[in-house]
Image (cartoon, rainbow, N blue to C red):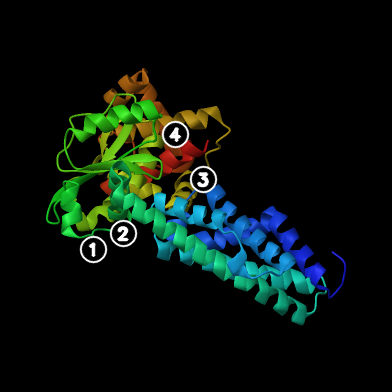
């Protein structure tokens, strides 16, 4: 970019930033970091919002027209989309404003690097700032209009209420609205989240679960629900996580646990209806990847992931822990002789210093957790 203090140079700067993927990503990260609701959206959606705001500012600079005369249809559509996705006005504005602040920082930094005088930068930022405020108002208008329409429509209203309960809780929800959808403020409900199936299977699962009452709908492209009773099962080829029944006030916490357990179950390629409590240990450990890395390096540092024999030793030790440190059950699971299991465990102890495999010896509970976690994460990284 040429060194000049002219307004066209400022417009060129803004056009450059709107087309710069790294700059757009930086603004999008700021928006996601400052709004948990925006952070739940697909990254591409947030980048689209950033480009919209930057190009709106560019158009304002080039046309220098009254913001009241602009057509903000796209901004209103964006607000409506966010309402349908369950993002609140407050959460949306937190993301928009954080992104706008980071965009201003980028404009000032790059503008000064390009030699644009501060007074030109200030004038340009004031011009696009007026349009940015008008864009934000249009986004809010679109969001509020869409919310009113969601409340009036049946299936959409159910999904909208469910998203609010799972993300914000029931504090601001009238009892009459809960009752309209079969929920009671004092009731206890199982939170359920299913891995995203195709539309046909999603409809089948929805119909099956709806027989048990409660509230079901699509949340973040997954089938989710608050159910008064547990279904007997889920289709064998689908994965669904469910919590014990809890008060409505705990719905956001239960939803977060379902999502965390869903990641664990997906990694293990599990299917069917699974209790979150059955995956509690693995889910809790998976939330601490940095600690897993330290433990893996401490206990299994001498192992070489490229060495097939070392992988065989780790696989055998993990199976031994999974089967209660029983040689016979481990051997049956691996289709080898118990002496082979014993030999591999001793070789692993020679290489790494553990776990204990002497006749009659058993790992303590903390030792079992440490070695199981280290072995599982080491093998997952191979």
Q: Nearer the viewer, residue 11 or 288?
A: 11
Asked if 112 appears above or below 141 in the picture, the reply is: below
Q: CA distance from mark 4 to mark 2?
A: 43 Å
Where's residue 109, x and y in %? 72, 72
Pointers 4 and 2 in contact (C-beta within 8 Å)? no
Mark 4 surroundings within 10 Å by alpha-carbon count, few (fewer than 14), some (14 through 19), many (20 or more):
many
- Residue 343 appears in the picture as rendered: yes
Q: Residue 227: where, in percent of width, then height?
A: 19, 42
Q: Which residue is mark 4?
A: 314
Disc 3 designates what residue? 301
Q: Which residue is mark 1?
A: 171
Which residue is located at x 61 percent, y 63 percent?
Answer: 70
Q: Earlier in the sequence, mark 3 or mark 1?
A: 1
The vertical placement of 330 against 85, above or below, is: above
| Quadrant of res 72 | bottom right
Disc 2 and disc 1: Cα gap in Å?
Answer: 8 Å
Residue 332 rendering spot, x and y as whole percentages: 31, 20
Mark 2 — residue? 168
**Which of disc 3 and disc 2 is earlier in sequence?**
2
Asked if the residue under mark 1 is in contact with the one under mark 3, i.e. CB atoms within 8 Å, the reply is no
Q: CA distance from mark 2 to mark 3?
A: 44 Å
């Amino acid at each position: 970019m040429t060194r000049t203090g002219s307004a066209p140079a400022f417009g060129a700067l803004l056009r450059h930033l709107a087309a710069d993927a790294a700059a757009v990503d930086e603004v999008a990260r700021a928006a996601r970091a400052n709004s948990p609701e925006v952070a739940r959206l697909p990254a591409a959606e947030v980048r689209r919002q950033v480009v919209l705001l930057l190009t709106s500012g560019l158009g304002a600079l080039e046309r220098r027209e009254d913001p009241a005369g602009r057509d903000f249809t796209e901004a209103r559509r964006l607000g409506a989309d966010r309402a349908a996705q369950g993002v609140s006005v407050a959460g949306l504005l937190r993301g928009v404003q954080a992104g706008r602040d980071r965009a201003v920082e980028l404009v000032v930094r790059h503008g000064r690097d390009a030699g644009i005088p501060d007074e030109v930068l200030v004038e340009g930022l004031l011009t696009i700032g007026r349009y940015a405020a008008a864009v934000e108002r249009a986004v809010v208008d679109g969001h509020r209009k869409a919310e009113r329409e969601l409340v009036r429509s049946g299936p959409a209203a159910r999904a909208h209420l469910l998203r609010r309960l799972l993300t914000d809780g029931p504090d601001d929800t009238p009892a009459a609205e809960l009752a309209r959808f079969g929920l009671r403020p004092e009731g206890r409900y199982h939170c359920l989240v299913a891995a995203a199936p195709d539309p046909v299977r999603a409809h089948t699962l929805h119909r099956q679960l709806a027989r048990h009452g409660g509230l079901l709908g699509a949340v973040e492209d997954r089938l989710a629900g608050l159910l008064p009773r547990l279904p007997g099962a889920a289709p064998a080829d689908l994965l669904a996580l469910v919590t014990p029944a809890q008060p409505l006030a705990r719905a956001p916490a239960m939803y977060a646990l379902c999502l965390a357990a869903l990641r664990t179950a997906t990694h293990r390629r599990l299917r069917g209806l699974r209790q979150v409590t059955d995956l509690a240990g693995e889910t809790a450990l998976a939330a601490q990847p940095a600690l897993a890395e330290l433990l893996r390096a401490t206990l299994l540092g001498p192992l070489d992931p490229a060495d097939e024999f070392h992988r065989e030793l780790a696989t055998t030790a993990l199976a031994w822990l999974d089967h209660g440190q029983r040689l016979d059950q481990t051997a049956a699971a691996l289709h080898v002789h118990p002496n082979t299991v014993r030999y591999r465990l001793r070789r692993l102890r020679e290489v790494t210093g553990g776990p204990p495999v002497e006749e009659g010896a058993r790992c303590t509970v903390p030792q079992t957790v440490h070695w199981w976690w280290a072995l599982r994460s080491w093998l997952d990284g191979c």
